Amino acid sequence: MKNDLALKLHEIVHSGVKTPFYYYDTSLLERTLHAARASSDQYGFVLHYALKANSNESLLPLIRQWISGADCVSGNEVQFAFNNGFPSEGIVFAGVGKQDDEIDLALNLDIACFNCESAEEIEVIQQRAARLGRKARIALRINPGVDAKTHHYITTGLEENKFGINLWELESILDLVNSCDHIELKGLHFHIGSQITSLQPYKSLCLRINEVTTWFENRNIRLEHLNAGGGLGINYQHPDEEPIPDFNTFFSLFHRFLRLRSGQKLHFELGRSLIGQCGSLISKVLYVKKGLHTNFVILDAGMTELIRPALYQSFHKIENISSNGANLIPYDVVGPICESSDCFGKAVFLPETKRGDIIAIRSAGAYGEVMASRYNLRNLVRSVI
Ligand SMILES: *Cc1c(COP(=O)(O)O)cnc(C)c1O
């Protein structure tokens, strides 16, 4: 960890802020947002922020300064994005299970687009829109059959996943859309998964999108926009070496391989790649327990504050920022929750660690605080920026 960040964290702890807490480096966040905008602007791409990655209200104003679109996956997220200043013409609503009242809310706010995932959903949106005297703009979320080669819990673009409309259903879906007078088809939506660190799946996605748009073109259907989703990964192993993802390479790949028709816009919905690296979960060592073969560092933070390791065996860099001893020892770093999966890392090499040391779990900005729970009746913890 960079020295100035470690000093800042010590300062925060010594000022009396109780651990655990989330720390967000807003300067890194701003540089990341700037980089994403600078890259995507080169090609005229439109960015949305995927609120589900982190909806901390003290970060949203900064994010909104750079990215005016919001990608939402629940009615509450739609309302929250709107309340936090995202204009309704930038809000899109995705998700396989939209409830009737969530659809009504989004219709009443006149959001930009519903990303629809099934025939039945389209029928329900048509009914609700007719009742409210509204017109719903929709995009069809297509399951492109592209393997993102990421953890199977965060892969979404395969036929066996619950997400999206399969290619063989398109003909009948199109007939349905044409029969719905309160629905306007505006675009297509794709999202193949998350924490994707190889560009190969994105290239396959581009080629598949080209095939699908040709299919629509052959039926004389003009699509105003294509939405390639999110999923760009971050470097969890080396957050200090690569604090900002390589947006240039990412966007230039789409520029190169995806064929846009004149006037057609390409949208993205980025979550993790914007917000992941700027957050850390800061915790204190409660106890060090020596075993026969394994030494445990027991933290005051657990899976209730960061569930990713327990949920998808994900790696987070763990650092003891109180000790800079050179002699590294392997520890299993665990939380206090009554679950064996409440483990942040096995055989993590740390300097000799003792009760009271401060531990930083890095790259916790995305899918950290938003997934916090009160399991074991623990308190939700605060964030510091
Ligand atoms: C989760 C999600 C995103 C954001 O994914 P990241 O991996 O955080 O970039 C974008 N679009 C949709 C539809 C999503 O469900």
Image (spheres, grey):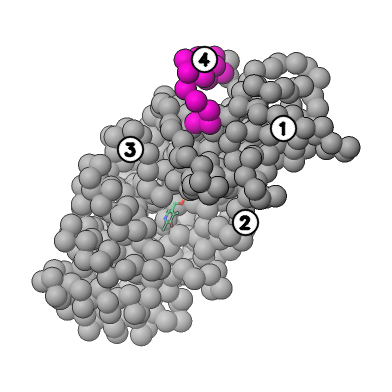
| Identity, as a three-letter code, of the amino acid under mark 2 | His
| Identity, as a three-letter code, of the amino acid under mark 1 | Val
Mark 1 surroundings within 10 Å by alpha-carbon count, few (fewer than 14), some (14 through 19), many (20 or more) = many
Q: Are marks 4 and 3 in contact (CB under 8 Å)?
A: no
Q: Position of residue 138 (x, y in %)?
A: 27, 67
Residue 58 seen by the camera: yes
Label 2: element kind: loop
What quarter of the picture does the C terminus occupy?
top left
Q: Are marks 1 and 4 in contact (CB under 8 Å)?
A: no
- Give the label on residue 125, or none: none
Residue 63 seen by the camera: no
Q: Are marks 2 and 3 in contact (CB under 8 Å)?
A: no
Q: Are marks 2 and 4 in contact (CB under 8 Å)?
A: no
Asked if disc 3 is less than 8 Å from ligand 1, the answer is no
Q: Reading the chain from its start, which is encountered first: label 3 or label 1?
A: 3
| Identity, as a three-letter code, of the amino acid under mark 4 | His
Residue at mark 3: 57
User: Which one is nearer the viewer's eye here, 44 or 377?
Assistant: 377
Q: CA distance from mark 1 to mark 2?
A: 27 Å
Q: Is residue 14 magenta?
A: yes
Q: CA distance from mark 1 to mark 4?
A: 21 Å
Q: Is residue 189 shown above or below 298?
A: below
Mark 2 surroundings within 10 Å by alpha-carbon count, few (fewer than 14), some (14 through 19), many (20 or more) = some
Residues shaded magenta: 6-21
Q: CA distance from mark 4 to mark 3?
A: 25 Å
Residue at mark 1: 297
Residue at mark 4: 14
Q: CA distance from mark 2 to mark 3?
A: 29 Å
Farthest residue toward the left?
133
Q: Position of residue 71 (x, y in %)?
A: 34, 52
Camera-nearest label, 1 or 2 = 1
Q: Reading the chain from its start, which is encountered first: label 4 or label 3?
A: 4
